[in-house]
Amino acid sequence: QVQLEESGGGSVQAGGSLRLSCTASGGTFDSYSMGWFRQVPGKQREFVAAISWSGDLTEYGTSVKGRFSISRDNAKRTVYLGMNSLKPEDTAVYYCAAVLSVVAIMNIRDYDYWGQGTQVTVSS
């Protein structure tokens, strides 16, 4: 069983930056591929980024490619999401997720464990 806790959300103006963190407890962290998803009220949860267990493989959603960066520190059991050039449409609750896999997983249905989410608000 893996428990995930996100942090680092907040309010920022358009063009600004934030870094989200997700720390895991339980399980063997470096056996899990990790992902970030986001959701706004009334819409489906959207894939943002994913990273393989080793950190060598990453995937990004189309809307964030080139602006967001996912990374992980297995010694700290933490995955990060660096967000630059933020836009108002990036406003959402951001969720961290984990799946027992060696590759970066984009499909939301494959993930087994989820955090509670952290709010990111980007104002124009």
Image: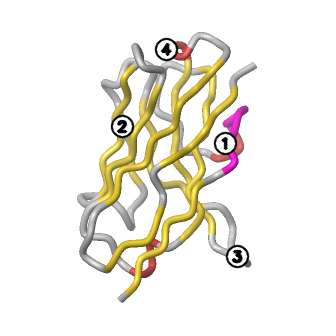
C-beta proximity under 8 Å, tags 1 and 3: no
Residue name at image x 49 percent, y 19 percent: 102
What label sits on residue 41 in the rendered view? 3
Q: Position of residue 21 (x, y in %)?
A: 45, 41
State which tag comes first along the sequence, 4 or 1: 4
State the residue position of label 1: 115
Q: Is residue 49 left or right of residue 124?
A: right
Q: Nearer the viewer, residue 5 or 31?
A: 5
Q: Position of residue 34 (x, y in %)?
A: 52, 33
Measure the C-alpha gap from mark 4 to mark 2. 15 Å
- Crowd band around label 2 with a 10 angstrom C-alpha radius: few (<14), some (14–19), many (20+): many
What label sits on residue 58 in the rendered view? 2
Measure the C-alpha gap from mark 2 to mark 1. 20 Å
Q: Nearer the viewer, mark 4 or mark 2?
A: 4
What label sits on residue 30 in the rendered view? 4
Which image quadrant for residue 112? top right
The type of residue carrying mark 3 is Pro
Q: Position of residue 99 (x, y in %)?
A: 63, 28
Measure the C-alpha gap from mark 1 to mark 3. 17 Å
